[in-house]
Image (cartoon, helix red, strand yellow):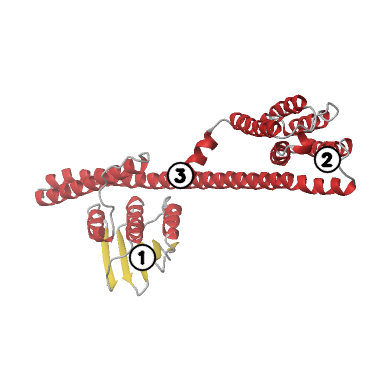
């Protein structure tokens, strides 16, 4: 068995049992030494005093001040009855060092310093009663007994510091976890609200498209009705995809639903066709070196254009222009229409979404009639 495993098993024992075993070892050593030495007084008194030392040694952690005082009181009381426990036996001195260590390790507050004063007074009294030396011997004995006490105080301070650091680390980790959970919940709610709006817009578009089917059939234009049905199907599929994504956002951690890919600029042409089906003339212009963008930027650009076109349709626009330009570092997009109303209610959410990637968004009324929405998004991680 390794030393670490043995130490771990000892640490797992009841502290009172460990103290009792230590007290039994020290007492047994003192009694054995008493029996082996030539008697220097009453052997019976000495053995009784050694047995009495077991009690304060056993209770040294429960009440270290009282236990240390009782320990020294026993050593002081056996002298008048012809005992020689402290004069010639080494065991009680080892026990005294243990008691002084326990006093510094486990006692605290005002009671500690009062107890230390009483202990020093009893040590000096024990030497003076036994006529075992002058002031020099008293001084050296005090110097000898103080280091165990100071060692106990140092270890107590270190243990307290480690406990405080562990507590602060646990609090910091708990606070970090709480902040992360709150941020995740807020982001989940924000995205869910955004997706709810997108689903509602898609359903509204389906309703508008469905109204045109009857008119196309009455006008004898079945081809146009078929195209409208195809647009309704595409819009419905996108609405279902958005709904699945919404449910995925609202699921608890650990649940992993299969989600369809989120829309991006690759589906911009389909978006334009869907808006055209609502009766709005949309002109799409893409310039620059077209290339893949960051996934988040790609989705954000699509959402900005989508919101601008749907807001234009809601507010009676008849035509719109969509411009997309791939620069060296940025993606510039602009949507201009002739709506009579103002900005969409979703504009603050769009600003937050664009700002999340380090981009900018500007929305202004055009001179005369119309509305313009312009945005710039970074194309690379460095820009974001």
Name the residue tied to disc 3: 2
Image quarter in which the C terminus is found: bottom left
CA–CA distance in space, label 2 to label 1: 88 Å
Q: Provide the secondary structure element on which disc 3 rests.
A: loop
Q: Is residue 293 left or right of residue 269?
A: right
For marks 2 and 1, the one nearer the N-term is: 2
- What label sits on residue 120 in the rendered view? 2
Residue 38 sits in which quadrant?
top right
- In the depicted view, which residue is nearer to us: 63 or 250? 63
- Residue 303 lies, in percent from the top left, at 34, 55
Q: Is residue 42 above or below residue 181?
A: above
- In the depicted view, which residue is nearer to us: 353 or 103? 103
Q: Provide the secondary structure element on which disc 2 rests.
A: helix
Q: Is residue 370 visible?
A: no
CA–CA distance in space, label 3 to label 2: 41 Å
Residue depicted at 76% across the width and 31% down the height: 39
For marks 1 and 3, the one nearer the N-term is: 3
Q: Is residue 149 left or right of residue 184?
A: right
Name the residue tied to disc 1: 334
Q: Is residue 28 left or right of residue 195?
A: right
Which class describes the residues within 10 Å of circle 1: few (<14), some (14-19), or many (20+)? Answer: many
- Residue 125 lies, in percent from the top left, at 87, 37
Which class describes the residues within 10 Å of circle 2: few (<14), some (14-19), or many (20+)? Answer: some
- Residue 308 lies, in percent from the top left, at 36, 57
Q: Provide the secondary structure element on which disc 1 rests.
A: strand
- In the depicted view, which residue is nearer to us: 234 or 78? 78
């Amino acid at each position: 068995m390794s030393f670490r495993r043995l130490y771990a098993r000892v640490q797992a024992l009841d502290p009172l049992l460990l103290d009792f075993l230590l007290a039994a070892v020290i007492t047994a050593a003192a009694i054995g030494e008493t029996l082996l030495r030539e008697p220097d007084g009453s052997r019976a008194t000495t053995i009784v005093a050694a047995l009495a030392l077991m009690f304060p040694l056993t209770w040294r952690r429960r009440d270290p001040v009282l236990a240390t005082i009782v320990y020294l009181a026993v050593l002081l009381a056996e002298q008048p009855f012809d005992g020689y426990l402290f004069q010639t036996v080494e065991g009680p001195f080892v026990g005294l060092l243990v008691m002084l260590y326990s006093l510094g390790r486990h006692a605290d507050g005002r009671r500690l310093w009062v107890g230390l004063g009483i202990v020093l007074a009893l040590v000096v009294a024990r030497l003076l009663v036994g006529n075992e030396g002058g002031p020099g011997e008293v001084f050296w004995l005090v110097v000898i007994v103080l280091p165990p006490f100071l060692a106990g105080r140092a270890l107590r301070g270190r243990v307290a510091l480690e406990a405080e650091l562990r507590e602060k680390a646990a609090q910091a980790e708990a606070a970090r976890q709480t902040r992360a959970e709150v941020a995740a919940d807020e982001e989940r709610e924000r995205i869910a609200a955004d997706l709810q709006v997108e689903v509602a817009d898609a359903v509204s578009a389906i309703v508008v498209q469905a109204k045109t089917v009857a008119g196309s059939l009455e006008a004898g234009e079945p081809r146009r009705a078929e195209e409208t049905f195809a647009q309704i199907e595409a819009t419905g599929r996108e609405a279902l995809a958005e709904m699945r994504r919404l449910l995925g956002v609202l699921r608890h951690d650990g649940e992993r639903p299969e989600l369809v890919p989120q829309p991006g600029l690759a589906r911009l042409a389909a978006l334009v066709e869907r808006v055209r089906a609502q009766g709005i003339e949309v002109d799409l212009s893409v310039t620059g070196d077209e290339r893949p963008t960051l996934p988040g930027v790609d989705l954000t650009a699509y959402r900005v254009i989508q919101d601008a076109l749907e807001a234009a349709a809601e507010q009676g626009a008849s035509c719109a222009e969509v411009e997309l330009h791939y620069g060296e570092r940025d993606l510039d997009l602009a949507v201009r229409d002739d709506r009579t109303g103002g900005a969409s209610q979703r504009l603050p959410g769009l600003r937050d979404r664009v700002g999340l990637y380090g981009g900018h968004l500007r929305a202004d009324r055009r001179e005369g009639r119309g509305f313009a929405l312009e945005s710039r998004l970074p194309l690379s991680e460095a820009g974001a």
